[in-house]
Amino acid sequence: MRYFIELSYNGKEYHGWQRQPNAISVQEVLEHALTTLLRIPIKIMGAGRTDTGVHASQMYAHFDMDEAFDFETLVFKINWFLPPDIAVHRIFIVRDKAHARFHALSRTYHYRISNTKNVFTHDFAYKIHLPLDIDKMNEACNILLQYKDFQCFSKMHTDVKTYYCVIKEASWVLSGTELTFIITADRFLRNMVRAIVGTMVNIGLGKLEVKQLHEIIKSKSRSEAGFSVPAHGLYLMDIQYPNTIFND
């Protein structure tokens, strides 16, 4: 039987989601907890690969196990077992071929920018003290929706077969002293959101004209795009799946 796990985590202390040979990851910690509690080796597949320091408000992963178990009891036990920066919200059964990564219809990320010094959020939002032109940044968001090839925002030397992504939503929202970039797409390339935000910040600071974004995207060159903003301001917020993967 296949099970989905819904969880969230503070990525500050982890080298991303994916298990690595010489660094601690969220996947490794979660697999260890499940293996210990279920008393059989458990391997999980996540919905994506968040980078070092990136957070997730909503992440899904799947694993296989022949035996049935009490979901609520396992959720209670695993949250007691896990460190405080990882939380499991629910575990539920899905169809046998449901895949946490490949069946995801869309993913939504938020990137948080603070324009004031805040001792309670400095680990969770990127501080920029200079004023940003939000109207120009939102104008640039409309340009993103016109394209599908985002090689210019991708980390170089990756093993992806295509740089095509369908961006369904992109906008900047100001709330008090915090500015949030919201982006939803069917898939994301490695470092894509952080590179987009860095380019948008350059537009907001007046270092780039809005229309130059067309040239940057068409160039397909990472060196033409802006800097990559720090990971600690990035959050995976939502993942959507088709109803067909769930058991009736």
Image (spheres, rainbow, N blue to C red):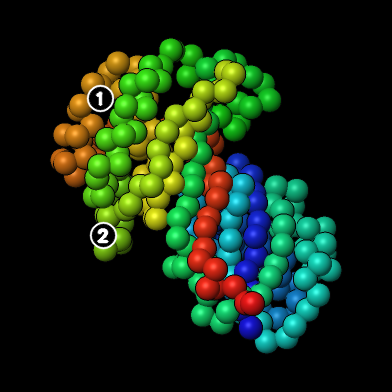
**Residue shown at the point (75%, 76%) measured from the top left:** 38
Pointer 2: residues within 10 angstroms few (<14), some, or many (20+)? few
Q: CA distance from mark 2 to mark 1?
A: 26 Å
**Residue shown at the point (81%, 67%) measured from the top left:** 72
Specify the amino acid type for callout 2. Thr
Residue marked by disc 2: 162
**Residue shown at the point (23%, 32%) measured from the top left:** 213
Q: Earlier in the sequence, mark 2 or mark 1?
A: 2
- Which of the 4 quarters of the picture holds residue 208? top left
Whether residue 238 is visible to the viewer of this picture, yes or no, is yes
Number of marks: 2
- Which of the 4 quarters of the picture holds residue 11? top right
Specify the amino acid type for callout 1. Val
Q: Of 135 and 32, which appears nearest the observer?
A: 135
On the picture, is 178 further left or further right than 216?
right
Nearer mark to the viewer, of 2 and 1: 1
Q: Residue 201, image x and y in percent?
A: 37, 25
Outermost residue on the bottom side: it is: 66
Above or below: residue 192 compared with residue 116: below
Quadrant the N terminus occupies = bottom right
Quadrant the C terminus occupies = bottom right
Above or below: residue 236 compared with residue 131: below
Residue marked by disc 1: 210
Pointer 1: residues within 10 angstroms few (<14), some, or many (20+)? many
On the picture, is 45 further left or further right than 139?
right
